[in-house]
Amino acid sequence: NSFYVLTVFPSIGSHENIVGYYSSWFENEQLYIQMELCDHSLSINKFSRTFTEGEILETLFQIAKALQFIHRKGIAHLDVKPDNIYVKNGVYKLGDFGCATLLDKSLPIEEGDARYMPQEILNEKYDDLDKADIFSLGVAIYELIRGSPLPESGPQILNLREGKLPLLPGHSLQFQNLLKVMLDPNPVWRPSAKDLVENPIFDKALRKGRA
């Protein structure tokens, strides 16, 4: 999405939980983008390990803050997944805005990885693009807990799109309920990024983790 990268992304501004953008240019008909260098991504294919609930909540909280920031700017990411969550010095950052678009639908919609997309996006219903990001973040968090890549299709993906979250042993009921509502098939019932950031689950968990 060259138009987006060259016109919209530079205007987002900086945020600690978003991979920094420095510059972009065309050279020999090829688009080059200079971005902040991070330590690694959370790609399940490259970074397979078990996350504690504290680490999961830290990831969820920080990426929710990134989404709150871009949604306030009128921007939807549309490709939230572990591959696009980066880590630098222990800080989680949302990157790869190649599928991003404007919430007012004035730019073409380019869907990201279908495994993380809610049903309404697959049905080309684009009225709640910010809530699509919430669903994708929920699927990404579930994949991190699962510790192995999601299949391209099949009953597991269909169940997630229907809001049917399997039991997660070792994780609190409060956390599982939060994840379940993020995956609600009706975007109206999903929390906003602001709702997520203000959820009391983070107050106790993150204070305890940083004590």
Image (cartoon, rainbow, N blue to C red):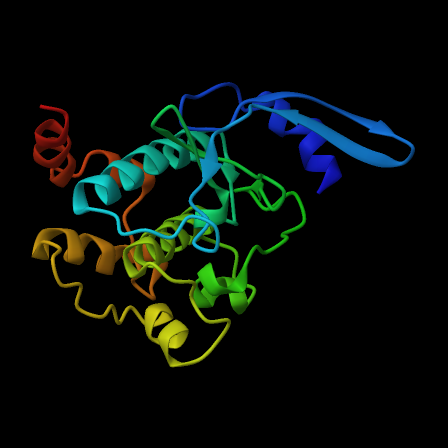
> Residue 4, position in %: x, y?
68, 36
Residue at image position (59%, 56%) is 111
Quadrant occupied by the C terminus: top left
Q: Nearer the viewer, residue 148 or 159?
A: 148
The picture places residue 39, in percent across and down from the top left corner, at 47, 30
Q: In the depicted view, which residue is nearer to us: 142 or 11?
A: 142
Q: Residue at x 40, y 21 (%)?
A: 16
The quarter in which the N terminus is drawn is top right
Q: Residue at x 37, y 69 (%)?
A: 161
Q: Is residue 19 above or below residue 163?
A: above
Q: Seen in the image, is 43 located left or right of residue 8?
A: left
Q: Is residue 82 left or right of residue 4?
A: left
Query: Which percent across, then down, holds residue 48?
Result: 38, 52
Is 175 above or below relative to 37?
Answer: below
| Whole-percent x, y for residue 137 in the image | 37, 50
Residue 9 seen in render: yes
- Residue 195 shows in this picture: no
Q: Please tell me how many numbered marks the rendered image carries.
A: 0
Judge whether 189 appears above or below 65 on screen.
Answer: below
